[in-house]
Image: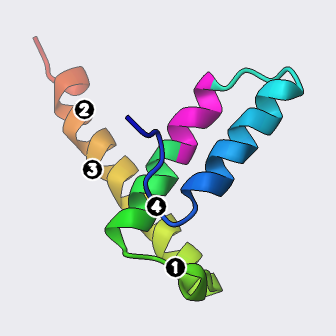
Amino acid sequence: MKRFESFLARELEEYVAYRKHLGYAKDGLGTTLTAFDRYLKKQNADWDAMQPSFFLQLRATIIRIQKQSIDSCLPLCCEEP
């Protein structure tokens, strides 16, 4: 099973290998790069899509997902007994 599937798959694999060769742990970075790769694939992104507006949309998506995650946890941690 390939770790990355977007048009940047080869470059992402090479970057992970490069960091591993330098002695960095790959676990934390791998999760972030996998999420980025999934977003690229979902958006059908290619080199032409790599414009500032693409990354602003990515940031807005991340913020929305984080907010949804926090909002779903609030009732669990803030309920009165």
Q: Earlier in the sequence, mark 3 or mark 1?
A: 1
- In-image side of 55 versus 37 (left or right): right
Mark number for residue 46?
1
How dense is the environment of label 3, judged by Cα within 10 Å: few (below 14), some, or many (20 and up)?
A: few
Please count the marks in the image: 4
Q: Amino acid at mark 4?
A: Ser
Q: Measure the C-alpha gap from mark 1 to mark 4.
A: 9 Å
From this view, report whether residue 74 is shown above or below residue 77. Answer: below
Look at mark 4 in the image and give the residue it sits on: 6
Q: Nearer the viewer, mark 2 or mark 4?
A: 4
Q: Secondary structure at mark 2?
A: helix
Q: Residue at x 13, y 18 (%)?
A: 80
Mark number for residue 68?
3
From this view, report whether residue 12 is shown above or below residue 16. Answer: below
Q: Earlier in the sequence, mark 3 or mark 4?
A: 4
Q: The N terminus is located in which quarter? A: top left
- In-image side of 32 versus 71 (left or right): right
Q: Secondary structure at mark 4?
A: loop
Q: Residue at x 60, y 23 (%)?
A: 27
Residue nearer the viewer, 50 or 2: 2
Whether label 3 touches label 2, CB < 8 Å: no
From this view, report whether residue 49 is shown above or below residue 20. Answer: below
Look at mark 2 in the image and give the residue it sits on: 73
